[in-house]
Every structure is written in structure tokens, then in C-alpha cells.
Amino acid sequence: MADKILNENITKQVKDAFDKQLSQPVRVMYFGKQTDCDYCADTLQLVDEVAALSDRIDLEVLDIEKDSAIARQFHVERAPSLVIAGRDGDQIQDYGIRFAGIPSGYEFSSLIQGLVLVSNRDSALQQKTRQSLKELKEPVNMLVFTTPT
């Protein structure tokens, strides 16, 4: 097995945050593929290390090609990708949170925050923002792109 991606200090910080902030189960759906995927192995290792820090997080490993029907259901088009969803028994609640590529560097804190938000089933948006969103008449697909440079 490769060396751990998360060092002892980061692991402790994330575990402490999870112990204090995670309230309900979360399903992390990892979509990778066996060939032509530069960051699949690293992404899987990273998310596996993160999921191991709390019994409220479970990891489902999927192949974007072999599990193409599930990938389409969750609107996943590239590997590696992550879907952060709520879990209630066998029911999966999709909150639309996706990561394409490895969530390292600045994106790592977004991954941890996404897990906390989904676990608490609350977006943490202000009431004014929630009201504005209720007034939308059509679906909105918002994409946020970041780079670790």
C-alpha cells in the first residue's frame, strides 16, 4: 500500500471536526476507472483515508464504465469523481455535491465542509438567500471550478 496521503496532524484535525460536527450518515460515491485515469488511485486513497475517520461516512467504490447507469443517475461524466450524498438506511439523498478530480490542496477543505453540510442536512445559507432561491422558476446548474495552483 502507498504511503498515507494525510499526515498525522491533518488526520487528527479532520477526525476531531467529524466527531464534533457530523450528525447523520453520509455516503461518498467514488467513480473511477481502471485505465487512462491519472488521479483515480490517489483520489480513492484520499477519500478512503477520510471516510475511515468517522463511522458516519461510508464509501462506495464504483467504476464509471462498469457502473455507467449509476454514473448517469448521479450525472457523473468523468473520472475520478465524487458524489457526496446523505444516507438514511438504504435510501440515498442526493444534494448535488460533486467533485471532479482529486480534492487536494484548497479543495480538500471544501471536501470536508461538503461532508459536514450533507451530514447536518443543512446548507448553512442565510434565510434571505434561501428565500431568493425559492423564487427561482427553473433549475439552475452551478459549476465551480478551482485549480490547485
Image: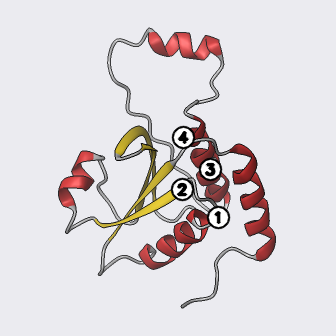
Q: Is residue 55 above or below residue 136?
A: below
Above or below 104: residue 28: above
Q: Separation of disc 2 and disc 3 at Cα?
A: 16 Å
Query: Mark 2 or mark 4: which comes first in sequence?
Result: 2
| Element on which disc 4 rests | helix
Q: Which residue is mark 2?
A: 57
Front residue (pair 140, 118): 118
Q: Amino acid at mark 3?
A: Ser
Query: Depth-wise, is mark 2 or mark 4 nearer the camera?
Result: 2
Left-right relation of 12 to 55: right
Question: Decide: marks 1, 2 in contact (CB < 8 A)?
Answer: yes
The residue that appears at 62% across and 44% down in the rendered structure is: 116
The residue lying at 67 percent from left, 54 percent from top is 109
Q: Residues within 10 Å of mark 4 (few under 14, many from 20)?
A: many
Residue type, numbered disc 2: Ile
Question: Which amino acid type is shown beneath numbered disc 4?
Answer: Val
Q: Which mark is residue 53?
A: 1
CA gap, disc 3 to disc 1?
16 Å
Residue 132: assigned label: none
